[in-house]
Every structure is written in C-alpha cells, then in structure tokens.
Image: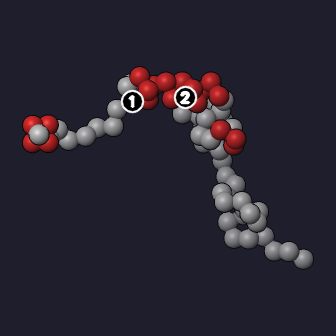
Amino acid sequence: MPVDPPGGSAPGQGRPKGPAKPCPECGKPANPAMLPFCSPRCRDVDLNRWLSGSYVIPGKDNEEEDAE
C-alpha cells in the first residue's frame, strides 16, 4: 500500500496543499492556474499598474552615478 509523502502533497506536485492565499487585487480566492491572481482581469490590472509606474521599487539616490 502506498504511503503519503511528507508534507501532504501528492507525488509530482511541488506545492503542499494548504489554504489558498487571496488575490492581491480583489481578495477572492486565487485561481491555481493564475497564481497569485483569481482571474485574467486582476492579473491585467496588476500588470497595468506596473507598466504605468504606479508601483515603484524604492531605491537609493546616488548622485555620483547620475553625474557620469
């Protein structure tokens, strides 16, 4: 009789089963096919925010590099 692997996931699956995290845009349960989002719409809203500059990764101002 086969024994379940540690962590509770089935063979060949990289993620253990657990509570799904909510979609970062709307809070609905995430769709496994579109992680971490729940729908193409939420995925596209997030992409648009990155492309329009709404999301910014903070960095250190370095005037010496700008002078070159």
Q: Is residue 27 left or right of residue 9?
A: left
Q: Is residue 50 left or right of residue 41?
A: left
Percent coordinates x, y for residue 65 in the rendering: 14, 42
Q: Amino acid at mark 1?
A: Tyr
Percent coordinates x, y for residue 23 in the rendering: 59, 34
Q: Could you say whether the residue bearing mark 1 is in a helix, strand or loop?
A: loop
The residue tagged 2 is 25
Q: Residue at x 39, y 30 (%)?
A: 55
The residue tagged 1 is 55
Q: Could you say whether the residue bearing mark 2 is in a helix, strand or loop?
A: loop
Closer to the chain start, of discs 1 and 2, is 2
| Residue 63 appearing in the image | no
Q: Residue at x 44, y 29 (%)?
A: 50
Identify the image quadrant of the N terminus.
bottom right
Q: Residue at x 70, y 41 (%)?
A: 33
Q: Which residue occupies the foreground of this view, 13 or 52?
A: 52
Question: Marks 1/2: CA distance?
Answer: 13 Å
| Residue 42 appearing in the image | yes
Q: Residue at x 58, y 30 (%)?
A: 43
Vertical placement of residue 6 versus 30, above or below: below
Q: Amino acid at mark 2?
A: Glu
Percent coordinates x, y for residue 63 in the rendering: 10, 38
